[in-house]
Amino acid sequence: MAAKQRGLGRGLGALIQDASGASAPAESGRDGTAAEPTVRARVAEIRKSPWQPRHRFEEEALSELIESVRERGVLQPLLVRKLEDGFELIAGERRLRAAQEANLKDVPVVIMEVSDQEALEIALVENLQRSDLNLMEEAEGYRMLGETFRMTQEQIAQKVGKARPTIANALRLLDLPDGVKQLVAERRLTPGHAKALLGLEIPQEQELLARRVVNEDISVRSLERIVAQAKKAPRKQRAAKDDVPLRHLHDLAEQMQGLFGTSVRITPSRTLANGKKAKGVVEIDFYSADELDRLISVLGLQEEL
């Protein structure tokens, strides 16, 4: 029987307890004090984590935290793991930055014994519980779990306590051009806007329309209509009929995504007005050679050397 997956629904403390055998301060009270004893570690000995999913920090909020740390110190311990010559941060980068800016010599920490995968999981869960991650950072974290640790979307969903379609939709946003992803990261575009823009195939069109959304304050519903019109325009010269109902293809794609543990898109074959056939397409996403090997195995195929 497979080991029970740790999920966000059980709380960060439960996830950390499974990983280290001790409760963690994430389950502490509102005053920020730790539920378990902590130790002190020198700020200079703590390295930033390569698994930190968060890249954007609001300057105003960070400035307020720095002032608070100068006055009261760091109240909630950082989560770290031991290195040969110091510590590696698992969670608490804002507190670490504030401590550095406030010139503190040491801070309270909880030392954990966790793997790289568990370190990333804990960092993701902590930020998700605090709603600190923007959507693109969240998606990058999911991709890292999938690519680095060969986790399926279903496994990722169980780890972070979200529905698998939520994970799949977040990962799809990574296909957007960099300019659009930047607007999403800055929260100038909503997830709904980003999802609608995925309906366009040309990156330049996606970026132009994204800028128009920001400048003209276009709603998601209006953007969906604009994208639908743009997609219809090239086909006005020829009548065509889908050979398979789109609803059926949608249901089939959902089943295939569950089987493969990755995003699947199906474009129906079409019968044109002149009777000729336009091919259909089945697209199965993968992000590494190992992921491709896994898909080949699920299909029951054997790779020839």
Image (spheres, grey):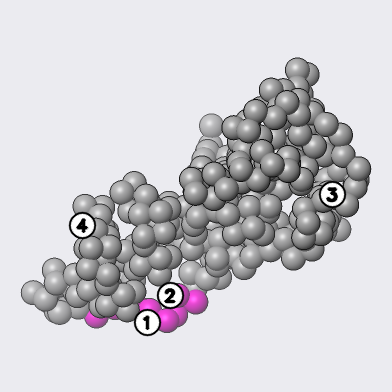
Q: Earlier in the sequence, mark 1 or mark 3?
A: 3
Q: Looking at the image, which residue is at 82% across and 56% down?
A: 28
Quadrant of the rendered image containing residue 125: bottom right
**SS under mark 3:** loop
CA distance for labels 1 and 4: 32 Å
CA distance for labels 4 and 2: 30 Å
* Residue 153 can be seen, yes or no: no
Question: Is 8 one of the magenta-colored residues?
Answer: no
Indicate left or right for 129 with 284 as reference: right
Say if 85 sits above or below 33 in the image.
above
Q: Are marks 1 and 3 in contact (CB under 8 Å)?
A: no
CA distance for labels 2 and 1: 7 Å
Give, as a three-letter code, the residue at label 4: Leu
Q: Earlier in the sequence, mark 4 or mark 3?
A: 3
Q: Looking at the image, which residue is at 69% across and 63% down?
A: 161
CA distance for labels 4 and 3: 49 Å
Q: Do the residues labelled 2 and 1 touch (CB within 8 Å)?
A: yes
Give, as a three-letter code, the residue at label 3: Ala
Residue under label 1, please give it: 245
**SS under mark 2:** helix
Residue under label 4, please give it: 208
- Magenta residues, start to end: 241-251
| Label 1: few (<14), some (14–19) or many (≥20) C-alpha neighbours in 10 Å | few
Rendered location of residue 202, percent (x, y): 23, 55
Residue under label 2, please give it: 249
Q: Do the residues labelled 1 and 4 touch (CB within 8 Å)?
A: no
Residue under label 3, please give it: 34
Q: Which of marks 4 and 2 is nearer the N terminus?
A: 4
Taking depth in this image into account, of 92 and 278 the one nearest to the observer is 92
Give, as a three-letter code, the residue at label 2: Leu
